[in-house]
Image: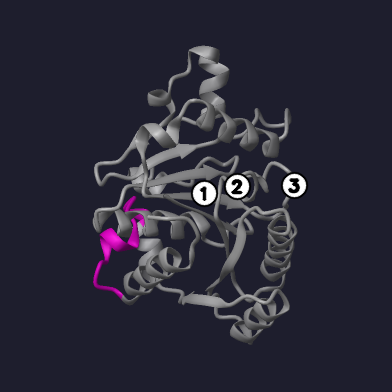
């Protein structure tokens, strides 16, 4: 089982990337589990026709100790196993702590043994890397960390913080930094900016994704690009990224 965490600042396209990668690999026969680690709880929406699924934290508040795996784990028709950690009631509680609670609950309930995925994808908000949001990097949850970034200043700033955290944890035997993925936004010098970032952390830019109208059009239809426009250049680039992630990630298939 490979366990990979995709990090990046809010709005950079992590969930879109994860949903497309999950759909592509599921179509190839892999059993994929995608776990949303963002209090917005919209990581897996594109895999459910644009609809959000119940969250672990929300269900915990509702059901307490009666919460079962089948309440919080939703499998799509294509075979992707989806979980949303969720977040606290707005204004109350810590979103990072919520992620810790959700991941510990999944482990305690034997989710990985029950569903036996070939690949686990953690979709993680990376604007801040506090203990909760860093949880997928720690204690064996993820084998490798990949950072999605554009060449924009704030995106690179967030990516640098994530890379720094990954390097800190690697020295303790946790997840390794697997590399960067460039999500192009059409800003001047973005390829060079992201390459400089990669050089600063002794890692590589594994792949790049160009802006394309297919992303917005597919999202409006509640579909992934891989499903809505399988022959597009965007779908081809996403397929390359899926393959790169599998080859670059740690763990075993």
Answer whether labels 2 and 1 touch (C-beta < 8 Å).
yes
Q: What is the crowding at mark 3: few (fewer than 14 residues within 10 Å), some, or many (at least 20)?
A: few
Percent across and percent down for residue 42 are 49, 44
- 7 is higher (above) or lower (below) than 181: above
Q: What coloring was used for the rendering? A: one colour
Q: Does the magenta run of residues contain 12?
A: no
Question: Can you say whether 106 is above or below 180 in the image?
Answer: above
Q: Where is residue 174 in the image (x, y as percent from the top left)?
A: 65, 53
* Residue at the disc numbered 1: 122
Residue at the image position 41 percent from the left and 63 percent from the top: 246
Q: Which residue corresponds to mark 3?
A: 130
N-terminal label among 2 and 1: 1
Q: Distance between the residues labelled 2 and 1?
A: 7 Å
Query: Residue at image x 73%, y 28%?
Result: 92
Circles 3 and 2: CB distance less than 8 Å? no
Magenta stretch? 219-232
Within 10 Å of disc 1 (Cα), the crowding (few <14, some 14-19, many 20+) is: many
- 145 vs 1, nearest the viewer: 1
| Secondary structure category for the residue under label 2 | helix
- Helix, strand or loop for disc 3: loop
Which residue is at a point 40% across and 40% down the rendered structure image?
Answer: 82
């Amino acid at each position: 089982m490979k366990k990979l965490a995709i990090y990046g600042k809010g709005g950079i396209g992590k969930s879109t990337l994860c949903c497309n990668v999950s759909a592509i690999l599921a179509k190839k026969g892999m059993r994929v589990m995608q776990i949303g680690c963002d209090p917005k709880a919209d990581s897996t929406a594109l895999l459910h026709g644009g609809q959000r699924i119940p969250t672990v934290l929300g269900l915990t508040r509702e059901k307490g100790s009666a919460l079962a795996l089948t309440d919080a784990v939703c499998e799509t028709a294509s075979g992707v196993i989806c979980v949303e950690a969720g977040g606290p009631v707005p204004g109350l509680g810590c979103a990072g702590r919520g992620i810790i609670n959700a991941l510990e609950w999944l482990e305690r309930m034997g989710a990985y043994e029950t569903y036996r995925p070939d690949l686990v994808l953690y979709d993680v908000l990376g604007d801040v890397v506090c203990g909760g949001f860093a949880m997928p990097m720690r204690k064996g949850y993820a084998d490798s960390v990949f950072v999605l970034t554009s060449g924009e200043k704030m995106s690179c700033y967030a990516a640098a913080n994530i890379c720094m955290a990954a390097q800190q944890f690697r020295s303790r035997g946790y997840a390794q930094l697997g590399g960067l993925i460039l999500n192009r936004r059409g800003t001047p010098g973005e390829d060079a900016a992201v390459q400089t970032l990669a050089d600063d952390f002794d890692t590589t830019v594994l792949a790049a994704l160009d802006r394309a109208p297919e992303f917005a059009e597919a999202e409006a239809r509640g579909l992934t690009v891989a499903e809505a426009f399988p022959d597009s250049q965007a779908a081809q680039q996403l397929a390359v990224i899926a393959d790169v992630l599998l080859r670059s990630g740690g763990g075993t298939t």
